Image (cartoon, grey):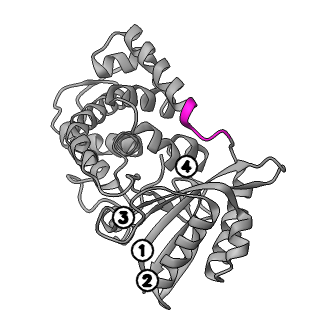
Amino acid sequence: MTDTHDAPSADARLAEFEQHRRMVFGIAYRMLGSVADAEDLVQDTWLRWSGVTGPVAGPGGFLARTVTNLALNRLDSAAVRRESYVDPWLPEPLVSEPDATDGVERAETVSVALLVVLESLSPLERAVFVLKEAFGFSYREIAEALDRTEAACRQVGSRARAHVRARRPRYDAPPELRRRATDEFLAACVGGDLNRMLELLAPDVTGWTDGGGVISAALRPLVGAENVARFVLGVLRKLGEAVGARPVLVNGEAGLMVTVDGAVDSVSVFEFAEQPDGTVRIAEIRSVRNPRKLAHLTRPAPDAPDAPDAPGDGAGRPDPA
């Protein structure tokens, strides 16, 4: 953050931004939990960056500082929307193919479960946690970005980490177990096999469904294997014969995508817990059905930004970077 560069040309400025674009999107997405809002902040950050005419001390630090403060401003209005939100709020999912490896090693810093926990932090706590834990900025750099003292940022970061540790799932299932259990649950759902679903679900499993008040969803969390399994089967029956389902990665973790006539109807991701008998079962299911939160999954993915003066996210389905 301290190296000073001479004022670059427009092309060099664009190239520098593209080098850091995934970081910019990643900060915005973790702060807001919304793909659409994160894409807006990527564009706003680009406009700020492209308008700089003098030398910049550390382009990466400048861009991180800019997008973080834009996100903090955006969170004020987001908080008002969340207070009146219908159904349990879940973040917009990032979806990729099951064989994707790019970014998966950082899935623990962008998982749906973590983003739900981050919602319970204050905006400042969220900013410090994201910059430190997900992107490795030092407390000195974070203090610079947020216009706080380093000591204050350390205190906020410690408080945020303790809160996240207390609320994150206790069991970290290996990726191969997640994928196998997800595939088996998908087969049981498609086959309407209630008994097999009950074998895969923990007795006290909890299911959240985010319909945003615009599509059928459980208004409150469902608790208990039979309640969750019957609800899932009921939704699939209502969708009719045109329903399809396939495994995908959701924020870097094994999940399911359900479609109707090719259009995305829902995206679900699981958390797992070890049972007293030593088996591992699905302990939490989070399903997003709100069409507004799934709209980005149906957009075409361009190979590159359309024009040098308007870089987008670079793909219809942003990577969990």
Query: Horizontal and vertical percent for residue 115?
Result: 45, 43
Callout 4 environment at 10 Å: few (<14), some (14 to 19), or many (20+)?
few
| Mark 4–mark 2 CB contact (< 8 Å) | no
Kindly identify which residue carries mark 3: 211
Distance (Cα) linking label 1 and label 2: 9 Å
Task: Please name the residue that numbered disc 2 is placed on.
Answer: 262
Q: Residue at x 27, y 40 (%)?
A: 13
Q: Picture quarter containing residue 196?
A: bottom right
Q: Which residue is mark 1?
A: 265
Q: Secondary structure at mark 2?
A: loop
Q: Which three-letter amino acid code belongs to the residue tagged 1?
A: Asp
Q: Quadrant of the N terminus?
A: top left
Residue 222 versus residue 3: which sits nearer the camera? 222
Task: Give the Cα separation between the discs numbered 3 and 1.
Answer: 10 Å
Q: Which residues are magenta?
A: 166-170
* Element carrying mark 4: loop
Q: Residue at x 52, y 63 (%)?
A: 268
